[in-house]
């Protein structure tokens, strides 16, 4: 999972892709470099992933079928989907808002905020999980007991899983939108303003359509990251079978219990969803989008 | 008076962009704000449009106090140097934007858009995206978009600055003709004195945040208020204690007129029909003089010739400033 993500993230921002580099003359170096790149990707990504696929389908569709017949596994997959959707929704709303704030407004502490936004990418997800437990832990967290008194359990429950996942995927949306906002500049909005559009109209008619593809990319990356999150979720979820065990946790569980077939099948499902998202976007994205 | 600006001050940090600017812009005219880059003319235009806020001072548009009115309520049309087209909308949608915001009936919008696209000669491009248009076409579209809302004033910020020289000249002529048809009060910013002299009814010369002079092109050219205005509107040279235009110097090969200054031709360049001379006078001035090719030939001028210079009768002459170059 993590591999797909890193590679998708390292792809150039959609805006930059518009300019095609001029064709360069092919020299022996070109072929050597191509070979190195191909070999690198093959051994690191393509081969391992393809082995997951072949292992999954060792005996036809039976292993996939078995997954959907196991009620606990269905719950796990549903939970993963539920958490991922919430993470995408929250990160999209906040991502758009924070990106606008970062690009369009000047305020004290802007650099600090900018740096803070990268923390979820640089800190290990395990640390994120532990930090959340420290704050929201039901028994001795800083804020948790208070919430628990109100009948609201965060840690070892779905809200905690959503929080951990949202936290980990937080920067992806912002890092997609900010460059697009910077590229389009402020003049289109000013033109709309002089034509009589109020703030909301400018946002819906000008800003949002302009950053549409940045958001789509952000959603795909956030979804992929959220579905694949493991470390932070493992700490905060409690990993209760049929209740707070997500699909990724189930993969580990199955693997440790020598149910390799089941582990591969689940891993395959997770990978397919992410790959499908990226492929779909690559297909529907117009070539010279703005 | 259509736009009245009073006591406008604007600073960006330590930089004074506008320093107590007072200007009145007449209704129905085409007015140019002319000045060097960084002189504050764009800032003035953006404050009139409401895209920038003045530190102090007031703006009145068509008699309405507009100082604290947001841009969206000023009913001004604004055209940007880099077009600011709505990239995701077709040409027709771009032009219709202001009307859709005003919730006009659909058929009225369609009719008006067709009319405007015809006016700017873009009818056959109505379903294209802006990225499929040339720079000049984009700017015409931006102009149609601004005109669609029937603004009380039309403001253009270096509208032709991003275009190449040929298109620029075409659009300039076209803007003048358009204005003669539409008659909306128009203010445009330019640093190109030729553009201002050719197109504008009235010119406001702005330098270092201050208004240097306001007048018709003829007034500015013939009666510049100071050395700066004179030098900005055309070539200037210095003879004796005054500044004047190089073609306004009478040149003789013998001392015929009283007060003529003696000098030696140090350089002679022929450019088409005119001949440019550098003359080193006995006073130590280096004076540039422009004469016609025929005149130069009849006097048999060449480098090293001794000549006598006098300001021509009726020449525009301004006392020389100490700082003038």
Image (tube, helix red, strand yellow):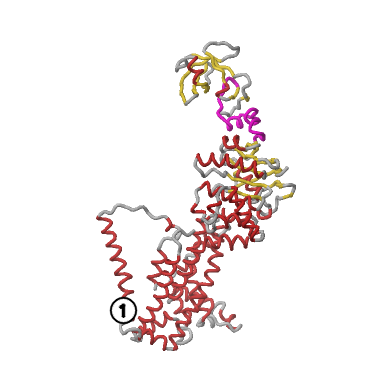
In the rendered image, the vertical position of residue B232 relative to residue A264, given as above or below:
above
Considering the image in quadrants, where does the N terminus of chain A appear?
bottom left
Is residue B186 visible from the viewing direction of this image?
A: yes
Picture residue at 38% right of the left edge, 66% below the top: A7
Magenta part of the chain: B212-241
Picture residue at 31% right of the left edge, 85% below the top: A59
Quarter holding residue B230: top right
The extreme left residue here reads A28
Mark 1 residue element: helix
Q: Is residue B185 magenta?
A: no
Q: Chain of mark 1?
A: A
In the rendered image, the vertical position of residue A263 relative to residue B15, given as above or below:
below
* Left or right side of B324 for A125: left
Quarter holding residue A284: bottom left
Residue A273 percent across, percent down from the top left:
42, 75
Residue B174 percent across, percent down from the top left:
58, 41
Residue B220 percent across, percent down from the top left:
64, 31
Quick one: B50 or A65, which is closer to the camera? Answer: A65
In the rendered image, the vertical position of residue A225 relative to residue B248, given as above or below:
below
Q: Is residue B235 magenta?
A: yes
Residue A117 percent across, percent down from the top left:
50, 65
The residue indicated by pointer 1 is A54
Picture residue at 33% right of the left edge, 86% below the top: A258
User: Crowding near pointer 1: few (<14 within 10 Å), some, many (20+)?
Assistant: some
Quarter holding residue A37: bottom left
Q: How many marks?
A: 1
Quick one: B58 or B128, which is closer to the camera? Answer: B128
Quick one: B141 or A28, which is closer to the camera? Answer: B141
Is residue B16 visible from the viewing direction of this image?
A: no
């Amino acid at each position: 999972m993590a591999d797909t993500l890193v590679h998708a993230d390292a792809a150039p921002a959609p805006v930059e892709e518009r300019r095609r580099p001029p064709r360069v003359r092919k020299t022996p170096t070109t072929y050597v470099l191509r070979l190195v790149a191909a070999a690198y990707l093959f051994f690191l990504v393509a081969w391992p992933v393809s082995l997951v696929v072949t292992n999954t389908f060792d005996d036809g569709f039976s292993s996939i079928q078995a997954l959907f017949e196991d009620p606990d596994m269905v719950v796990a997959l549903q939970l993963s989907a539920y958490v991922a959707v919430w993470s995408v929704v929250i990160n999209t709303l906040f991502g758009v808002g924070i990106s606008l704030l970062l690009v369009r407004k000047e305020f004290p502490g802007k650099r600090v905020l900018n740096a803070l936004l990268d923390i979820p990418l640089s800190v290990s997800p395990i640390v994120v999980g532990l930090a959340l437990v420290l704050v929201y832990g039901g028994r001795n967290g800083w804020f948790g007991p208070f919430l628990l008194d109100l009948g609201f359990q965060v840690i070892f429950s779905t809200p905690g899983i959503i929080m951990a996942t949202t936290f980990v995927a937080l920067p992806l949306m912002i890092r997609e939108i900010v460059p697009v906002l910077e590229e389009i500049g402020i003049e289109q909005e000013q033109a709309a303003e002089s034509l009589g559009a109020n703030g909301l109209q400018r946002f819906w008619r000008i800003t949002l359509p302009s950053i549409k593809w940045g958001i789509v990319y952000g959603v795909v990356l956030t979804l992929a990251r959220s579905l694949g999150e493991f470390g932070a979720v493992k700490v905060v979820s409690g990993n209760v079978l049929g209740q707070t065990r997500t699909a990724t946790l189930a993969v580990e569980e199955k693997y440790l219990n020598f149910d390799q077939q089941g582990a591969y099948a689940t891993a395959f499902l997770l990978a397919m969803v992410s790959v499908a998202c990226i492929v779909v976007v690559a297909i529907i994205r117009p070539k010279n989008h703005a | 008076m259509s736009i009245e600006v009073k006591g406008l001050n604007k600073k960006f940090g330590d930089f004074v962009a506008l320093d107590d600017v007072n200007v009145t812009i007449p209704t129905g005219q085409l007015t140019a704000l002319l000045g060097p880059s960084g002189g504050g003319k764009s800032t003035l235009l953006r404050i009139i449009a409401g895209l920038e806020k003045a530190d102090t001072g007031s703006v009145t548009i068509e008699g309405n106090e507009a100082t604290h009115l947001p841009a969206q309520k000023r009913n001004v049309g604004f055209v940007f140097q880099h077009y600011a087209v709505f990239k995701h909308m077709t040409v027709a949608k771009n032009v219709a934007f202001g009307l859709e915001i005003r919730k006009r009936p659909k058929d009225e919008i369609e009719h008006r858009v067709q009319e405007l696209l015809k006016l700017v000669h873009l009818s056959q491009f109505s379903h294209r995206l802006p990225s499929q248009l040339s720079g000049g076409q984009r700017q015409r579209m931006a102009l149609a978009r601004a005109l669609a809302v029937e603004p009380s004033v039309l403001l253009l910020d270096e509208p032709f600055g991003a275009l190449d020289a040929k298109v620029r000249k075409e659009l300039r002529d076209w803007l003048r003709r358009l204005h003669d048809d539409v008659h909306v009060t128009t203010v445009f910013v330019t640093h190109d004195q030729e553009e201002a002299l050719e197109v504008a009814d009235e010119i406001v010369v702005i330098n270092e945040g201050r208004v240097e002079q306001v007048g018709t092109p003829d007034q500015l050219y013939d009666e510049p208020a100071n050395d700066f205005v004179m030098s900005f509107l055309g070539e200037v040279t210095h003879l004796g204690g005054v500044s004047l235009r190089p073609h306004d110097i009478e040149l003789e090969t013998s001392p015929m007129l009283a007060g003529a200054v003696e000098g030696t031709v140090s350089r002679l360049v022929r450019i088409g029909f005119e001949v440019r001379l550098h003359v080193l006078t006995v006073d130590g001035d280096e004076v540039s003089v422009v004469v016609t090719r025929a005149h130069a030939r009849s006097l048999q001028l060449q480098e090293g010739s001794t000549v006598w210079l006098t300001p021509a009768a009726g020449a525009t002459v301004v006392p020389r400033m100490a700082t003038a170059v």
